[in-house]
Image: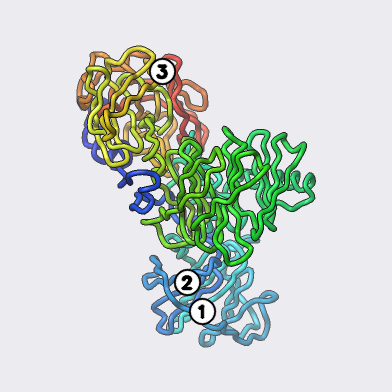
Amino acid sequence: MCPRATTRAKWASRAGRLALAGLALWLPAGVVSAQEGAGARLDWRQFGNLSITGPAVAGLASGPVNRVWYSTAGDRLAVLTAAGQTWETTDFESWKSAALAPPARAVAEASSLPEPGAHVLASGARLYAAGAYVWSSEDEGRTWRNLTQFAKFSILGGPLTDLAVSPTNPDDIAVANLRGVWRSLDGGYTWDSLNALLPNLPALRLLQTPERGRGLALAFTTGEEAEWAPGERTGWRPSESSRLAAERGLATTIARATASAPVRALRAGTYLYAGAADGRLFSSSDDGLTWREFRFADTGRVESIFADPREPQIALAAVAPASASGVRLLRTTNAGLFWDDLSANLPPGAAHGVTADLATGTVYLATESGLFLTVTNLRNASPATRWERIDNGLPRAPVQDVMLDSEGNQLYAALAGHGIYRTLAPHRLADPRVVNAADFSARAAAPGSLLSVLGRRVASARMGETVVPVLAASESESQIQVPFEARGATLSLNLADGTPGGRRLALPLRPLSPAIFIDRDGTPMILDADRGLLLDAQTLASGGGRIQILCTGLGRVSPDWPTGLAAPVEGLPRVTAPVTVYLDRTALRVTRATLAPGYIGFYLVEAELPVVVNAGPAELYLEAAGSESNRVTLYLRP
């Protein structure tokens, strides 16, 4: 069998696996409308994992852990995190919540300390000590062996907060620090991380959602920034981004102009907003030349400010109450001249983050008590409406922040310790949107391309008298294929979506509108042509190799192929438009551009990589007769 036939056979056998990888329709268990669906069970899915990678430590890290201790039988280990949560493990891998109180710290006597302030424990004739490093002594502390130093650094990532020794085995020790919890079974000569499944990711704020080739970015409670890059599979990696530094710089500038000390600062075009620890709100509509100050009664620290750059005169501020009253959410429609209260029935406790969709008036609020939604008119001083919880299906934990992607389609929530979760934004059920199925963008449709209808189950669809195939549908999302026969500048659709008379839509139509498929974690659907493996941050593309790119929107093919029919395995119809693949703006040799075998609406573009490539991430995109696709990241090795 020739190499190309082998590749086609791989594609035929791979179809089911790729559908599971997120190439076909994502089918969340949706709800019926933004407000009515608040009490329904949204399909929350975890984004990324609970581990941190990157620091020079002996394994995956997590957030700060204050205490660690063994059970009296030595068969259980418990930790108290800096967030105040207690977890227990019996298999030293998985963790469950436990109602345990840490024991009093035991202290042993030693002839000397290996470092000032070290905590010493005795285990039979052996002593252990914890400070910046872990130490052991066999002679009552007269001499000490450093168990965790490599060069001038600790392999556990910093000073220790606690040390525990198993009551049944003096070689079984565990330590805790700002990077998590670690265990040794040989008296400290080798160490294992126990952090992979510990619900202790120190997520504090969402800084960026995954789109346009970028990853999801977080601020940690430790003051660090981290990112889950497209294609990441191991853990959150510390980022050198300056987002927080830029915000601090803006806050410093505002502080000079307002004689205050802002704890939150936001720029939306020429509009500036800031909030202080005492509840005062500051605003400027002229890039800081003049300022307004406003303060509501009985408000504490301003925790979060939201403003949409497209309508920056509208802003929301989540404010902690000064007393035991409920969460406070304030709104301005006139750039801070006046703020009104939207708190309504919110429960007591702290508010942490806020985001909104102005078109539908939907507001999402992250609080100590959970995640809430309300719908109101944000463009005028409409009264507050009732808030509903939308965290069914999420772990029970304080919600630290909430954010919508730039298109307002996906909702992301950061939970204390439990990481990041996402779902189709509930307001999409009240305001359906048709997007490109490859990257959820609002790009134009093209003959043969795939579209996703967000917020509706589509039973049938038509383009004039032509039937438009509905490939899959759920209560909150459907997928359709644009007929290959579509012509002109506008695609007129009539969707039978349960509304009286159906829904009529007019979308921009272009002969070509390429888009590379990405999964819900932002990983582009690019495969190694010879191995058939999905390429990501762990499975790298090799210099001189061939890659296969799954995309849509490449238009007509030759010979013509029926709309709604899966492409054959042999004799694949070829794309008629010229297709170019760019890697870091350098054109690659494209060996073929066809329909993807066994799929409907998918195209397969194969290209050869240069023999010599730079190691690391590279930008990749397609161009078809001058029309560019989305830009994605391909990870390379020489």
Q: Amino acid at mark 3?
A: Ala
- Residue 94 makes an appearance in the image: yes
Q: Amino acid at mark 2?
A: Thr
Residue ID for mark 3: 624
| Residue depicted at 37% across the width and 15% down the height | 511
| Residue depicted at 32% across the width and 33% down the height | 530
Secondary-structure class at tag 2: strand
Secondary-structure class at tag 3: strand
Residue ID for mark 2: 86
> Relative to 563, does residue 488 appear above or below in the rendering?
above
> Could you tell me residue 300's position as x and y percent?
65, 59
In the rendered structure, which disc, 2 or 3, sits on the residue that comes first in sequence?
Answer: 2
Residue ID for mark 1: 102
Asked whether the beta carbons under mark 2 and mark 1 sit within 8 Å of each other, the answer is yes
> Relative to 586, does residue 635 appear above or below in the rendering?
below
Q: Bin the neighbour count of mark 2 within 10 Å (Cα to Cα): few under 14, some 14-19, many 20 and up.
A: many
Mark 2 against mark 3, which lies toward the viewer?
2
Toward the viewer: 230 or 154? Answer: 230
> Relative to 484, does residue 370 appear above or below in the rendering?
below
